[in-house]
Amino acid sequence: MSAATQITNLRENKHGFSPQEWEARLDLAAAYRLAARFGWHDMLGNHFSLRVPGTTDQYLINPLGLFFEEITASSLVKLDTKGNILSDSPHGINKAGEVIHGAVLAARPDIASVMHLHSSAGAGISAQKDGLLPISQNALILMSRVRYHDYEGPASDDDERRRLVRDIADGSILFLRNHGTLTAGRTMGEAFVLLGRVERACEIQLAAQAGSGIHFPSQDAIDRTSAIGAKMYSEGSRSPGAHLEWAAFRRKLDREDPGYAA
């Protein structure tokens, strides 16, 4: 059986989901598998979500008990923004996932996907007093999108929802102080690509701080690059919603790990 035939067979929706929901499940499962390959997991912690197409209050998220590398399209859990689980999950879901994702998706109808990590680089920068510094092109592209939220514990308290929403405001990147990072995208591809850029910017900053001194760009360069970054992935850009980047990521996974589509 050829790789193309295997992928086609795996992608067949044999689980009774609508075609739109099945495609969303494929996207989200692919994101988890890619994140595992990039080393972004934290044991059974961390979570990505994607709004169910055609709904305003339902989304998909990973079940508790599976590593990122084990997640498939059919294993994802559906719930609503009030925390009600709408599909089977033997071990339920991570409470912090429900608090964080439910809050942002309920408050921001423009957002389709939310992604949260505890990576070493992202958590390291989240713990720095000055946060993300404008010292690399990746950081500069992101600066206009970045917001901060003070640490309140492991995000398992429903009362924190209001403050999470307040702090992300109209941004799409949130540093949860002493905790990790979060991205919010109008498409899942946008949220994933922003997360990749955040990771790279944080890694570069930590590498630069290990040296003898940091050179900062001119304020004019900072302002111009930040303005360009603010328009990236917009409807008028070359890759609205990061669709070009996400299509490339999906092709990569189809070649290397097609089992996500089960």
Image (tube, rainbow, N blue to C red):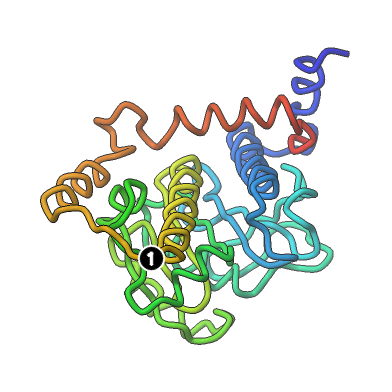
Up-down relation of residue 148 to residue 116 (above or below): below
Give the image location of residue 153, x and y in percent: 54, 86
Q: Nearer the viewer, residue 191 or 99?
A: 191
Q: Choose between 197 and 102: the one closer to the eye.
A: 197
Q: Residue 158, position in %: x, y?
A: 52, 82
Q: Residue at x 75, y 15 (%)?
A: 4
Quarter residue 91 falls in:
bottom right
- Label 1 crowd bin: few (<14), some (14–19), many (20+), radius 10 Å: few
Label 1 secondary element: loop
* Residue 33: quadrant of the picture: top right
Residue 137 position within the rendered picture, expressed as x and y whole percent measured from the top left: 32, 46
On screen, residue 149 above or below 44: below
Q: Which of 15/30 is in front?
A: 30
Furthest-left residue in this view:
220
- Whole-percent x, y for residue 78 in the image: 65, 55
Q: Is residue 81 above or below residue 115?
A: below
Residue 249 in the image: above or below residue 194:
above
What type is the residue that disc 1 sits on? Ser
Q: Is residue 18 left or right of residue 190?
A: right
Residue appearing at x 37%, y 54% in the figure: 109
Viewport quadrant of the C terminus: top right
Q: Is residue 141 left or right of residue 200?
A: left
Q: Which residue is mark 1?
A: 212
Seen in the image, is 256 located left or right of residue 25?
right
Residue extending farthest right: 1
Q: Residue at x 79, y 61 (%)?
A: 89
Locate the N terminus and report the quarter of the image it occupies: top right
Q: How many marks?
A: 1
